[in-house]
Amino acid sequence: MMKKAIQIPLKVESLEAALLRLSKNYVKRPRVEQELGKAKAGYFGEKSIDYYLKDFSSNHFHILHDLRLRIANDNFFQIDILINTPNCLLIIEVKNYVGSLYFDGNFKQLIREKNGVEEGMENPIPQVINQQRKLKKWLNINNLPSLPIIPLVVIANPTTIIKASSDYKEALEMVYLADNLPAKILSIQQTFNTRRKIIHDLDSFSDHLINCHEPKKVDILEQLKVPESAILTGVHCPNCSALPMERKKGSWYCPKCLFESKEAHIPSLKHYYLLLGKTITNQKLRNFLHLPSPYTASRILKSMNLKYTGSTKFRQYELHF
Ligand SMILES: [Zn+2]
């Protein structure tokens, strides 16, 4: 059963917001588009795996997407898909690579050929072995039962060709095309079902892992070295996407298509939240939405029922989406 479903990653939402707020000829736009393409491929690849897991709906089979756990201070590890069963755990690292993949045992390297061009790719095998080691350590630190952890790499794209040199044992054991995942899971289940149960309350076990999940903070502007000054301000028209709308008598008006909206500022505030900060002041709201007065800004902030700290003038409102 699905215990923690996949969600659109903050990185995808932030990159999409950035594209809406960078001018068409901004020099780093292609880089932002490229990053968005990669982030989306990863997301859709991982999402597509749910199709192959849909037949495993039992209460003894918990599927958890995107788990990020803390080993110590700043030391985290992240798992694409974790499957909890009473006798063993499965870690699935999903890659949405296209082309022809070759796992080279000599140098423990992954080489991809696409359109006649060869390139080295991030090798998911050491990655998933590292996650296995860290999860084992994490269970130990948290006084949870120690049970077999099986690492798997799943290639989400069904047309990808996979090859491995015969001496790359881990590649031959761990790497699967998504179509072959159900059969592999069934064989793992057959092996472990005959053994004694190690986790008796699987619900509490999975809930505990979910409670310990700490999502990664995303600061796209910092990551891509895009200055705040490059971000276009104003409210987009929900009808024609033009920027900025004008605030008149409690409504937003589009000077281009004459569309009127009362709620058009909400997506803009989400863009602010994704790109510029989780808190906002009256002054910053006024600048970002192009509001004529502090009173209008105040009214909008009040209507959103946001938590705040600080006294009137320097009050920081917590945005929440
Ligand atoms: Zn418009």
Image (cartoon, helix red, strand yellow):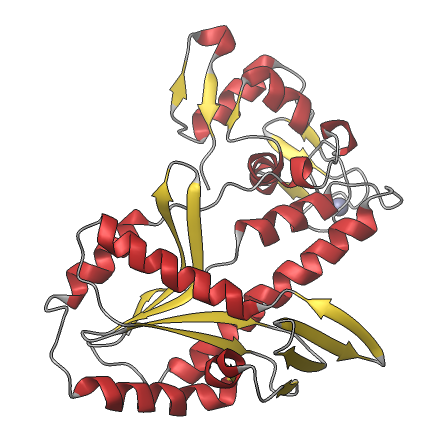
- The reply to whether residue 14 is in sight is yes
Give above or below for 256 relative to 94: above
- The reply to whether residue 259 is in sight is no
**Residue 157 percent across, percent down from the top left:** 61, 81
Give above or below for 238 relative to 314: below
22 vs 234, nearest the viewer: 22
20 vs 189, nearest the viewer: 189
* Count of numbered circles in the view: 0
**Residue 29 percent across, percent down from the top left:** 81, 47
Q: Which residue is drawn at 76% across and 39% down?
A: 243
53 vs 163, nearest the viewer: 163
Give above or below for 81 relative to 299: below
**Residue 28 percent across, percent down from the top left:** 82, 44
**Residue 58 percent across, percent down from the top left:** 23, 81
Residue 242 occupies quadrant:
top right
Quadrant including the N terminus? bottom left
209 vs 249, nearest the viewer: 209
Residue 167 occupies quadrant:
bottom right
Q: Which residue is drawn at 78% across and 32% down?
A: 230
Q: Residue at x 66, y 45 (%)?
A: 17
Give above or below for 82 relative to 22: below
Residue 66 occupies quadrant:
bottom left
Q: Which residue is drawn at 43% across and 71% down?
A: 92
